[in-house]
Image (tube, rainbow, N blue to C red):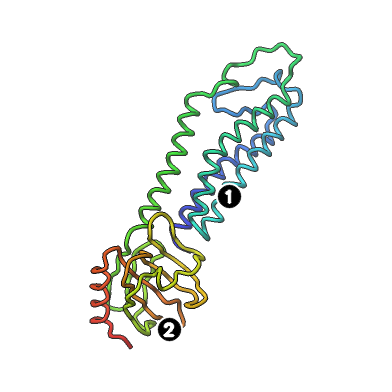
Amino acid sequence: MSSSNIFFAIICWLCSFVFGAIAIWAFKSKEPMHFWSGSTVSPEEITDIPSYNRANGWMWTIYTIGMIMSGILSLFNIIIGAILLVVICIPGTIVLIIAYNRIYKKYKNTSARCKIDSSTTKTPKAVVIAIIAFVGMVFVLIGIMSYYGSKDPIVNIRDNDIQIKAMYGLNIDLSEIAEISLIEKSMDDIGIGTRTNGYGGFGEALKGNFKSDIYGETLLFVQAHSSPTIKIDRINKKDIYVSFSNSEITKQLYSKLISTLPSK
């Protein structure tokens, strides 16, 4: 589990905290719950205020659970978590509006002659701006993660370890390396296997934990269709595969690794 997974999950859970607070407010409120910020629903408009508020509370609770699930899924697969979050934020907001309108119509007091504030039927501009800003923030976050995930890794050879700086990056202690080899194939030709907890978004970049029937559990930092590929065999740990978009950079790194760390 990488820091990026945890960071994204925390964002989802912070959002869920906000909507969870709205749900609790709806359950506990003595006054009719309103949907839009700045709008009001007068007691005269609602026939059964406790039932009306409970219905709103359950609506927001379900929405909150969706946010929580997005965070949990992102811990294991950040792409699935991000997709769920986008679904919750865009189509989910429309579903919320439809659900609230149905709740309001169900409990609306049609017999009472009360003047309904126009803000209950019109969406305030501030709310529209807030929704657009929130959705935009989600897309920006996903864009940043996609950019970071698709970048080639940065590999530093240090005195006691090899540092791989990337999504799912790690430090490889020199003492755990059994062999370093250069395979004249792309990772796609070698056999990627199944992603268990890793990045495999747009483009050819693959990062993180994968598993195949032939090679078992592996850790990839590769461009799937680029060859050659560096393989780092580790003692009692997952083998690591590294390749770059530019094959010459891959070969240069291999030469540096071999000159610094002769194969055992």
Q: Is residue 87 left or right of residue 263?
A: right
Q: Which residue is the site of mark 2?
A: 235
Other-residue count near label 2 (Cα within 10 Å), few / some / many at <14 / 14–19 / ≥20:
few
Residue 69, compared with residue 220, is above or below; it is above
Q: Is residue 197 left or right of residue 69?
A: left
Which one is earlier in the sequence, the residue at label 2 or at label 1? 1
Q: Residue at x 41, y 54 (%)?
A: 202
Q: Position of residue 191 (x, y in %)?
A: 44, 72
The alpha-carbon separation of the residues under discs 2 and 1 comes to 38 Å
Residue 262, compared with residue 71, is above or below; it is below
Q: Position of residue 108 (x, y in %)?
A: 72, 22
Q: Quadrant of the C terminus?
A: bottom left
Residue 13, compared with residue 193, is above or below; it is above
**Disc 2 on helix, strand or loop?**
loop
Q: Position of residue 138 (x, y in %)?
A: 45, 43
Q: Residue at x 26, y 81 (%)?
A: 258
**Disc 1 on helix, strand or loop?**
helix
Other-residue count near label 1 (Cα within 10 Å), few / some / many at <14 / 14–19 / ≥20:
many
Q: Amino acid at mark 2?
A: Ile
Q: Position of residue 248 (x, y in %)?
A: 23, 69
**Numbered circle sitting on residue 68:** 1
Residue at the outermost bottom position: 264
Pick whichever, 22 or 147, lies toward us: 147
